[in-house]
Image (cartoon, grey):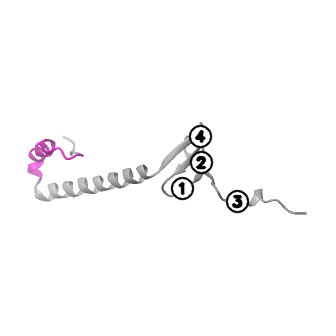
Protein backbone atom coordinates (compact mmCIF):
# COMPACT_ATOMS: atom_id res chain seq x y z
CA UNK A 1 0.00 0.00 0.00
CA UNK A 2 1.29 3.44 -0.98
CA UNK A 3 1.73 6.01 1.80
CA UNK A 4 -1.44 8.11 2.19
CA UNK A 5 -1.24 11.69 0.91
CA UNK A 6 -4.21 13.15 2.74
CA UNK A 7 -5.50 13.34 6.28
CA UNK A 8 -7.80 10.30 6.21
CA UNK A 9 -7.19 8.59 9.57
CA UNK A 10 -8.47 5.21 8.33
CA UNK A 11 -5.96 5.19 5.45
CA UNK A 12 -3.12 6.11 7.79
CA UNK A 13 -4.16 3.46 10.33
CA UNK A 14 -4.18 0.75 7.67
CA UNK A 15 -0.82 1.97 6.37
CA UNK A 16 0.71 1.97 9.88
CA UNK A 17 -0.42 -1.60 10.57
CA UNK A 18 0.91 -2.73 7.19
CA UNK A 19 4.32 -1.10 7.83
CA UNK A 20 4.62 -1.58 11.61
CA UNK A 21 7.32 -4.22 11.14
CA UNK A 22 9.66 -1.63 9.62
CA UNK A 23 10.16 0.06 12.99
CA UNK A 24 9.57 3.47 14.48
CA UNK A 25 12.48 5.09 12.62
CA UNK A 26 11.02 4.18 9.24
CA UNK A 27 7.54 5.34 10.25
CA UNK A 28 8.95 8.63 11.57
CA UNK A 29 10.76 9.33 8.30
CA UNK A 30 7.61 8.56 6.32
CA UNK A 31 5.52 10.92 8.47
CA UNK A 32 8.10 13.70 8.13
CA UNK A 33 8.25 13.24 4.34
CA UNK A 34 4.45 13.27 4.10
CA UNK A 35 4.31 16.54 6.06
CA UNK A 36 7.03 18.11 3.85
CA UNK A 37 5.16 17.07 0.69
CA UNK A 38 1.93 18.51 2.05
CA UNK A 39 3.64 21.83 2.87
CA UNK A 40 5.17 21.99 -0.63
CA UNK A 41 1.82 21.23 -2.32
CA UNK A 42 0.03 23.80 -0.18
CA UNK A 43 2.63 26.49 -0.96
CA UNK A 44 2.40 25.73 -4.68
CA UNK A 45 -1.40 25.94 -4.61
CA UNK A 46 -1.22 29.24 -2.73
CA UNK A 47 1.11 30.67 -5.39
CA UNK A 48 -1.09 29.39 -8.19
CA UNK A 49 -4.26 30.81 -6.67
CA UNK A 50 -2.67 34.23 -6.21
CA UNK A 51 -2.32 34.66 -9.97
CA UNK A 52 -5.24 35.00 -12.36
CA UNK A 53 -5.17 35.36 -16.11
CA UNK A 54 -7.86 37.37 -17.83
CA UNK A 55 -7.92 36.04 -21.38
CA UNK A 56 -8.64 38.84 -23.86
CA UNK A 57 -7.91 36.82 -27.02
CA UNK A 58 -7.14 33.11 -27.45
CA UNK A 59 -3.40 33.82 -27.36
CA UNK A 60 -3.36 37.00 -25.22
CA UNK A 61 -4.14 37.55 -21.55
CA UNK A 62 -3.55 40.01 -18.74
CA UNK A 63 -2.10 38.72 -15.50
CA UNK A 64 -3.86 39.88 -12.33
CA UNK A 65 -2.12 39.33 -9.01
CA UNK A 66 1.19 37.79 -8.18
CA UNK A 67 4.60 38.63 -9.56
CA UNK A 68 3.34 39.58 -13.04
CA UNK A 69 0.36 41.71 -11.99
CA UNK A 70 -0.57 44.02 -14.85
CA UNK A 71 1.53 42.29 -17.49
CA UNK A 72 0.24 41.52 -20.97
CA UNK A 73 0.99 37.88 -21.72
CA UNK A 74 1.22 35.95 -25.00
CA UNK A 75 0.61 32.20 -25.27
CA UNK A 76 3.56 30.47 -26.91
CA UNK A 77 2.68 27.64 -29.36
CA UNK A 78 3.94 25.15 -26.73
CA UNK A 79 1.27 26.42 -24.30
CA UNK A 80 3.41 28.50 -21.94
CA UNK A 81 2.48 32.10 -21.18
CA UNK A 82 5.23 34.61 -22.01
CA UNK A 83 5.41 38.19 -20.75
CA UNK A 84 5.06 40.82 -23.46
CA UNK A 85 5.05 44.08 -21.53
CA UNK A 86 3.84 45.74 -18.36
CA UNK A 87 0.61 47.57 -19.09
CA UNK A 88 0.53 51.27 -18.30
CA UNK A 89 4.25 51.78 -18.86
CA UNK A 90 5.62 53.69 -21.82
CA UNK A 91 7.64 51.48 -24.14
CA UNK A 92 11.05 52.83 -25.27
CA UNK A 93 10.46 51.97 -28.94
CA UNK A 94 7.08 53.77 -28.85
CA UNK A 95 8.53 57.18 -27.95
CA UNK A 96 8.03 59.83 -30.60
CA UNK A 97 10.88 62.12 -31.51
CA UNK A 98 9.99 65.83 -31.71
CA UNK A 99 11.43 67.51 -34.78
**Residue 15 colored in magenta in the image:** yes
Q: Quadrant of residue 57?
A: top right
Give coordinates of residue 91: x percent, y percent: 71, 58
Mark 2 touching mark 4, by CB under 8 A?
Answer: no
Query: Along the polypeptide, which appears first: circle 2 or circle 1?
Result: 1
Give coordinates of residue 50: x percent, y percent: 43, 52
Tell me: 91 left or right of 12. right
Q: At numbered mark 1, what does the secondary structure look like: helix, strand or loop?
A: loop
Tell me: 5 left or right of 85. left
Question: Label 4 crowding class (10 Å Cα cut-off): few <14, some 14-19, many 20+?
Answer: few
Give coordinates of residue 75: x percent, y percent: 59, 42
Q: CA distance from mark 2 to mark 1?
A: 9 Å
- Which of the two discs, 1 and 3, sits closer to the camera? 3
Q: Quadrant of residue 8?
A: top left
Disc 2: which residue: 73
Q: Which residues are magenta?
A: 5-22
- The circle drawn on residue 90 is 3
Query: In which quadrant is the N terminus drawn?
Result: top left
- Which of the two discs, 3 and 2, sits closer to the camera? 3
Mark 2 touching mark 1, by CB under 8 A?
Answer: yes
Q: CA distance from mark 1 to mark 4?
A: 16 Å
Q: At numbered mark 2, what does the secondary structure look like: helix, strand or loop?
A: strand
Disc 4: which residue: 56
Q: CA distance from mark 3 to mark 2?
A: 16 Å
Tell me: 91 left or right of 80. right
Disc 1: which residue: 68
64 shown above or below 96: above
Residue pictured at 10% horizontal, 45% vertical: 13
- Which of the two discs, 1 and 4, sits closer to the camera? 4
Q: CA distance from mark 1 to mark 3?
A: 17 Å
Give coordinates of residue 24: x percent, y percent: 11, 57
78 shown above or below 51: above
Amino acid sequence: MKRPEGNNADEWTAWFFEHAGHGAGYLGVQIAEAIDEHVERTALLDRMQAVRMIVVEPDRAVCVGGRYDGWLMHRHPDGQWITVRKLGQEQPHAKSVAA
